[in-house]
Image (tube, grey):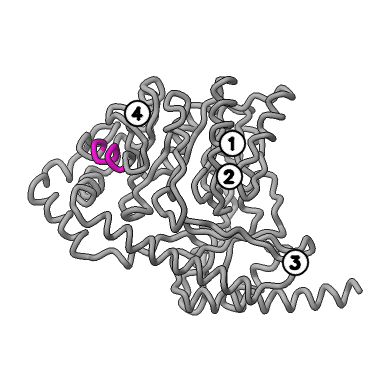
Amino acid sequence: MAEFSVDRFVDLYAGRTSGMSASEVRALFAVAARPEVVSLAGGMPFVEALPPEDVLGAVREVLAERGGVALQYGGGQGHLALRDRLVDLMAAEAVVADPDDVVVTTGAQQALDLLGKIFIDPGDLIAVEAPAYVGALTAFGAYEPGFLQVEIDDQGMIVDQLEEALVRGERPKFVYTVPNFGNPSGVTLSYRRREHLVSLCREASIPILEDNPYGMLRFEGDPIPCLRTLDPENVVYIGTVSKVFSPGMRVGWALAEQSVVQRLVLAKEAADLCGSSFTMLVTERYLAGDRWRPNLDSLVATYRSRRDAMLVALDEMFPEGATWTRPSGGFYVWVTLPEWVDTKTLLAAAVERRVAYVPGTAFYPDGRGKDQMRLAFCHPNEERIRDGVARLGTLLADEEQLYRSLHP
């Protein structure tokens, strides 16, 4: 057992570290990994469905043909062969790009951190959805901004609220959004609101950071143009292969204008010199083959079935007064419970009943959202999803009975 000791460096840490805290999502991973616990918490892609021979084939080709390059340092912008392939990948969502405008990062998370580093000064205001992706809040929070929280509904970010804030004189450095099947809400920004957002931000000279990890995980309906497609000059596009290939590759990217690209490369080189040549080239080989698209189609069908299982289970097993989103893609369902429920406090009891979720408070900079939770349907199978929702439903019913007895 670790011994307790006084931190002799406590007076030496930078002031910004006082705001650093462990992500509630990451803190759940150890508990959620226990086999008896149904984890509806972490948004882990179902990589077990990837055919091993497809991945091994890419690895073998890279080592046989470019082993000396794959095992060596590379440039800060990322290998050109991969950037070419990422341009093709973005084209599948009608995003037009040039490989010179792409910076490969160590996952999309590093892209968020680097963008925070080059844009945010302490005290700057940035606009985010409410609720927002916890990883973005953590990455940006390290640079000590203020947060302008813009509410969402079933059509995504309520852009009218952002416009009202601008009229009041608020001037965020940028607007950050996950417009497709958002994390944690699962909702998608409507086409009308996309047009409104890009027009508003263009007129106000406020850049948009468009984070699009889930865009290719659509279950039904027609794709909606990306924000980058609507306004290439004012939108920085952030992508990842974590959902179309593997999060273990740690390959993400940012697509931006050259002035931004140059600063991102400098920031990237200062952070880690360069990304992994090996994983970049393995990713390039995998995407160059003819198997990645059928593999993705199979994954999307799996996720769709699991989404359906979760929605049916919620309809049957959650208490009256609870509401939830009905995503048409992605990984998540966002649940809002009666206001007397505190999902952060309730989590310990849920784990005792062998089910885990993420409390809503993780997704708001000001800690609101105590009556909300994020449920992930991407990794457990349909039977496990049904079991997990049933356990949560029983727990909520018991909590409601106790609440009613104390508040007749």
What residue did someone put label 4 on?
265
In the image, taking residue 121 as reference, residue 88 lies left or right, namely left
**Front-lying residue, 75 or 7:** 75
Depicted 190 relative to depicted 354: above or below: above
- What span is colored magenta in the figure? 83-89
User: Given contact means CB atoms under 8 Å apart, are the residues at marks 1 and 2 in contact?
Assistant: yes
- Dot 3 falls on a residue whose secondary structure is loop
**In the rendered image, which quarter is residue 401 located in?**
bottom right
Give the overall secondary structure of the magenta segment: helix
Q: Is residue 87 magenta?
A: yes
From the top left corner, tell me how far across and down residue 185 is, in percent: 58, 53
Q: CA distance from mark 4 to mark 3?
A: 49 Å
Q: CA distance from mark 4 to mark 2?
A: 25 Å
Question: In front of the other: label 3 or label 2?
Answer: 3
- Dot 1 falls on a residue whose secondary structure is helix
What residue did someone put label 1 on?
16
Indicate which disc residue 321 carries: 3
Indicate which disc residue 20 carries: 2
What amino acid is found at the position of numbered circle 1 in the picture?
Answer: Arg
**In the rendered image, which quarter is residue 237 located in?**
top left
User: Given contact means CB atoms under 8 Å apart, are the residues at marks 4 and 2 in contact?
Assistant: no
From the top left corner, tell me how far across and down residue 94 is, in percent: 36, 38
